[in-house]
Amino acid sequence: MNQQAPRAFDVIVVGAGFSGLYLLYRLRKMGFSTVVLEAGSDVGGTWYWNRYPGARCDVESMEYSYGFDKQLEQEWNWTERYPAQPEILRYLQHVADRFDLRRDIHFHTRVKSARWQEETGTWKVRTESGDTLQAAFCIMATGCLSTPRLPPFKGIESFQGKWYHTAQWPKEGVDFTGQRVGVIGTGSTGIQAIPKIAEQASQLFVFQRTPNFSIPAHNGPIDQSFQRSLKARYPEHRAAARASFFGVPVEMTADSALATPPEERQKRFEAAWQYGGATRTLQAFADLLVTEEANATAADFVRGKIREIVKDPAVADLLCPTDHPIGTKRICVDTHYYATYNRPNVTLVDVRKAPIVEITPKGLHTEAGDYELDSLVFATGFDAMTGALLGIEIEGRDGLTLQDKWSSGPSAYLGLASAGFPNLFMMTGPGSPSVLSNMVVSIEQHVEWVTDAMAYLREHGLKSIEADAAAETDWMRHVTEVADTTLFPKANSWYVGANIPGKPRMFMPYVGGVGPYRDHCQGIADRGYEGFVLEPDGPQGKVQRAV
Ligand code: FAD
Ligand code: NAP
């Protein structure tokens, strides 16, 4: 860390992914002295850490990109519809360079704790190397999917081959040529990595516990004339994304799948499948995420596709999800995933029926037998939504810790702030649309809302903003009520914390839609930050309650 840097700032931001970079850009422009602390050695967040083969976005590049700067969006040219990790990382590095952001980012700096100092009205942030920094505001841009989860497999330390977690992939890459490789995990990550690893490995064993629905990306080079024409109407396109349900501008329909004749329904699903990606399938009918019968029409369609593609009917059967309604776990978006199982060097192993017992020096032992492996890949996911936040000792007023407050599940007003933690914001936190959306759209909305709130405080001589406990409780009740009107809570997904044993189970993201959420947040700001307690600067001023 630069020893010359001042230790006191207006704002400390933790994390230098999409969220942290835009925060720094905007806060600096608004005249707030800001420092960003980042555990990695460079910018990029998700796209810095997840370098596994096949990693790419599942939202099209022209939408999965910043819209805050007109020149940036005009000058950057995407090469693919769904760019791969190296291209997205290059884009974020370009953003950092273009706006000269790196000079205020401290890399290799993991934050250990953040404690509210009542006497000074500041946050004291301590890093793992023992440095302390202080600021009036602390913003956790620590990511929803940034704490990798490695299940405690017995015997892992005895394995004589090499093993990798997809979210901590070596920068130099891995060459699996000629190797016997095992992959554990068939979520979005596994589904992207498996076809690429299969191209190199002599033998690939996929250890599947639960199959997921996947829809082909139909990825390819972006047609340059399409790119030019979309750039020409970027303002309208971005506005439509902001107002949309998932943060992707797809026309909404009021049609019911059940009320639509079967051939017409099939045609619409087929068109969505041929277009590629998940959004068009999910939005093909209005009732897919609301009634099980409607949902089953889409699920049957995708299962039919799996059976068409995979030649061995027993393997196809194993790949067909039946334990959750389609869309209630994030739908995977793939390139040749199902067809990979037609390759002679790929074996699907059912570890639901015969669970993994242990990892051995030579490979992996399940209840059904032994598999000799040279390398093992864990695509086993994340402690999502709360993992990174609870990985930091965050202590607010009167010694209240976030760990204690969230011991039975996270609670945050609008997913942005939690009562008892003044001047602490979180980006895309639990209770906001976050992972149910095109996250760049959600991130931009959060950054703008939070920085506008800080500017409001400054203009009005206010020193702190804190979520009101009652408003927060009402919001979290609303989050649950809206989720309960959908099929989302029916899945054992990481949205409800089901992938981490012992994690309190609740539906964490807000399913009310990106556009409606945005309007709601704007209304709250317009009404003087309704539901927040704002405290005046200066001696013993009266507390202004905007609740
Ligand atoms: P992140 O990018 O996760 O960045 C958080 C940063 O905080 C990290 O760099 C981390 O090192 C740092 N950090 C965390 N804790 C600490 C600490 N204690 N101290 C210091 N630094 C810390 N979303 C989509 O909408 N579309 C997609 O196609 C898509 N694809 C994805 C693919 C993968 C493989 C994954 C894992 C996620 C994907 N997501 C996608 C979600 C993705 O996380 C978001 O789109 C977005 O990149 C999040 O940006 P962020 O800045 O909020 O968080
Ligand atoms: P994930 O969806 O949580 O999948 C983890 C996988 O590991 C599951 O198949 C799980 O099986 C398996 N697993 C975990 N523990 C296991 C065990 N002990 N034994 C056997 N199997 C085990 O994680 P992910 O695939 O990394 O994706 C997480 C999220 O990141 C996605 O939902 C998405 O939002 C984002 N992402 C997006 C993309 C993209 O396309 N752009 C790519 C990657 C990630 P069970 O289901 O049986 O637990």
Image (cartoon, grey):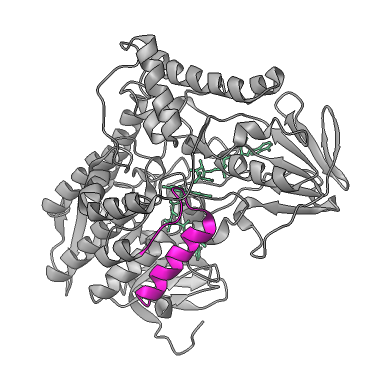
Q: How many marks?
A: 0
Q: In the image, 255: left or right of 141?
A: left
503 falls in the magenta region: no
Query: In terms of image quadrants, where is residue 13?
Result: bottom left
When the figure is inspected, residue 198 is found, relative to residue 12, above or below; the finding is: above
Can the viewer see residue 118 in this picture? no
Which residue reaches farthest bottom?
4
Q: In the image, 37: left or right of 427?
A: right
When the figure is inspected, residue 389 is found, relative to residue 488, above or below; the finding is: below
Residue 16: x and y, percent?
A: 44, 66
- Tell me which residue sits at (35%, 21%) in the image: 290
- Tell me which residue sits at (83%, 53%) in the image: 161
- Tell me which residue sits at (40%, 29%) in the image: 272
When the figure is inspected, residue 288 is found, relative to residue 131, above or below; the finding is: above
Residue 350: x and y, percent?
A: 72, 27
Q: In the image, 479: left or right of 343?
A: left
When the figure is inspected, residue 22 is found, relative to residue 529, above or below; the finding is: below
Residue 404: x and y, percent?
A: 46, 50
The one of 365 and 217 positioned closer to us in this rendering: 217
Q: In the image, 281: left or right of 516?
A: right
Residue 416: x and y, percent?
A: 32, 52
Query: In terms of image quadrants, where is residue 240?
Result: top left
- Tell me which residue sits at (37%, 78%) in the image: 100
Query: Which stretch appears magenta?
Result: 76-100
94 falls in the magenta region: yes
